[in-house]
Image (spheres, rainbow, N blue to C red):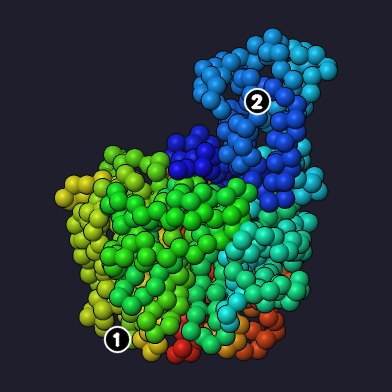
Amino acid sequence: MTLAIETYSNPNLRQGWRPGNNFGGSTLFKALGHPKTAAAGRALVAQLRGLGCIAVYDPEPQPAAAHVDAFFDLASCDIAGVFVQRLEDVGDRRLGHAARPVTDLAAAGVDGILVTAFDAAAHERQLRALVGEDLPILTLDGMRLPDAWLSNDRRYLDPLNFATNFALIRDEGGRFTRLTGANYWGLYGAGNAALWCAAFDADGSCLAEWEEALPAPGAAFTLDSREIRSRFGLPPFTGSLFLHALRVAGHDVVKYALDVMSADGSQLSCTHDANAWPADLYAGVPAPEDGERLTLLVQNSHPVAIPPGAVGASLMGSDAVAWHPAGVPPFGTAELDLGALLPEARYPQQIEIHAGRYFVRPRYETVTGNARVRIAHANVERTDLEDDPDLPGLAPVMGKGFILPLPVLPHAAFASSLLPTPMATCQADLPVTAALHAPDGRVLDERFLGRIPRDSSATVEAGAWLAELADGADTAWGHVEFRYDFRDGGAGDGWLHALGRYTQADSGHAAETIFGAHIYNTVAVYRDEPQSYSHRPPGLTTRLFLRLGPAPMRTLCHLIYPASTPWHPLSRTQLTLVDGGGRHMASHEVRIACNGSLFWYVDEVFTAQELAAAGPAAWVQVRDATCRLFGFHGLQNGDTSFCLDHMFGF
C-alpha cells in the first residue's frame, strides 16, 4: 500500500541540475501536505462536495489531481470527468476517469470546476472562454502559504519556497534532543531568513508552532527540546519537529545535526537531517544482537493517517514482509518493535523498511542488554535505479571512480566494524573491494570481498585490521575505502553504501552511521559527480559544519581526503572557529595527505581562551578551496559514552 504521491525523481535521468538537491525532489507534495495548509485542503474538498457534480481540470505537466486525492480524498466528490490541457495526456487514467481534452469542458454540464494547480490565474482566464463567467472555478491557490514566507513569489512551487524537513524531538524520561544548524542561507544572500517550527506529539497533535529568528549569516543556531518545553509549558513527549526555512537563498534543504542525550550519559547519539522526500523503502538497519531491543521511529510526514498494515519490515533479500498492524495518525510518531516483527533476525543481517512514501528517512533505536541506547538513521533504498554498464569502463578517466570512505577510529580506544549494505532494489549483489588507508594516504592492505549476495553480509572489522598492521602512532587511526571491483563480474549503479558501527572500548557504548559512494576530486564529470553543494559539478572544494557539544563533552572530528584520481598531495584545510554572530574568531591550517585522514579534537586545535571568546553558540567551519573532503563528527563524554555521524556541507 503506497501513498500515491511523487516525492523525488532519478538524478541520473533528470534533464537539468540544481544545487542542494541530490534527488530532484518534488515540491508539489510539500505544498499540499504542509502542516500550515492542510486544513485549507480539507476545506477545499468539502466546498467541492457542496457544489454538486464537478469537473477536475489537471493541466500541469506534473499531474496534481492524484496528490490532492491522496491527502484530501478528492475522489469522494461527484466527479463528472477529468480534463487535461496537453493532448498527449488524453486517455490517461486519473481519479478513475480517462482524461479528456480541456475543450470538452464547454459541454460537460457540471456545477463547478477544480483546477488542480497553483499560480492558476492564467488557467482560470482560459477556462472562462469555454464555460462563461458564472460557473464556480476553484484552484489550489486557496491553499497558499503567506506571501511573506516565500523566497520566490513569482513561482509558488519553486523548491526554495519549500525548504522543509522533519526532526525527531524528544524530551521525556531524562532524554532530550539538541538540533544544531547554521544560517548558511545568509551566506547566499538571504537577508531575512527564519524558521517556522511546529512540534507534534506522538498522536499528531500540534503542541506549539512558532517562528524562530535565524542568527547572522554563517552563525549557528540550536533548538533544544528542554528550552522548547519550558517556553511553551509542554508535557514530556516524543514526536516530530517540522522545520520550514523561510525567505531563503542558495539551498532548498534544511540540514542539521541532531544530538539525542540523556542526563545520566547512558544515551548519547548524533544523527542528521531526515531527507525531506519520503521514499518507498529504507535500508541499512542492522538487525539486533541477542539481548538487544530494536525499534523504528516512524514519523508520519503527511496530513493523512498511515493505514494499518501499510508499514512493514523484511530481511534484506527476502520477499517475506512482516506488516505492522497499527496505523499512525497524521503527523504522528510510532515506535515499531522490529524485533517483534522479525524475531529471528540477528546481526549482521540487515533489515529493509517498507514505508510506502508515508514518512521521511526514519531513525532506529537500539537498547542493549546493559541499558545502553543508541539512535541512528536508515537510508533511502532506491527503487528507480538500474545497473550502469558504463561503470567498469570509467577507470581510464575516473580512476577509482565511485568510492565510499568510512573512518577507522583510533584502534586502542574504539572498535570499528564496517558493513556494506544493499541500497537499491536492482542490487542483486555488491562486487566490492575494501582498501585500508593509513593517515598519510598509504594503502596498508586490500581485501576483495567478492560479489556479496543481497541476502548476505560481509563485515569488515577495520579496527582490528588496522591494529594488525599498525606501525606506531602514525597509524593509530585511518580509513577504509569501499569501491567497486568487477574482477568476478557483477554490476553497479553508483549507489554503493556501507554502515559503520563504532564501539567505545571503555564503556561498550556504540554509534552507527551510514553513507554512500561518490566520485571525489577529479576534474572530469560523470553524470552529477563529483557533486557540488553550490555550483555545477565537479565539486572540488569543501565547507563542512562542525557543531560543538556542551561541556563537559569533547567534540571530535575525523576528516578524510578521498581521491578517485591523483590530486593535490596535501590539502590546505582551514579550521575556523565561528562565534554566535558569524564572526571568524580563530583559524588554524591543517594538511591532510591525499587518500589520507585526520582524527582530532576541537580542544586540541583551539585554545581554551579562543573557545571561551567564541562563546556557547560557536561552531567550526572546515574549509578547503583545493579539494573535497568528507567528514565525521562526534561527542565524547569521557569514558562513559560517545557518538559519531557524518557531517553536512553547504
- The picture places residue 254, in percent across and down from the top left corner, at 61, 57
Tag 1's secondary structure? Answer: loop
Q: Can you say which quadrant of the picture contains the N terminus? A: top left
Residue 450 visible (yes or no): yes
First in sequence: mark 2 or mark 1?
2
Q: Can you say which quadrant of the picture contains the C terminus? A: bottom right
Numbered label attached to residue 143? none
* Mark 2 vs mark 1: in front: 2
| Residue sitting at x 67%, y 70% | 223
Q: Which residue is mark 2?
A: 78
Q: 615 above or below 485?
A: below
**Where on the picture, by quarter, is residue 141?**
top right
Gap in Å between the C-alphas at discs 2 and 1? 77 Å
Q: 244 above or below 174?
A: above
329 sits left or right of 223 in the view: left
Nearest to the observer: residue 244 or residue 132: 132
Mark 2: amino acid:
Asp
In the rendered image, the residue lying farthest to the top is: 107
Q: 534 above or below 78?
A: below
Nearest to the observer: residue 186 or residue 424: 424
| Residue sitting at x 69%, y 46% | 38
- The picture places residue 357, in percent across and down from the top left corner, at 50, 47
Residue 547 visible (yes or no): no
Nearest to the observer: residue 449 or residue 305: 305
Tag 2's secondary structure? Answer: strand
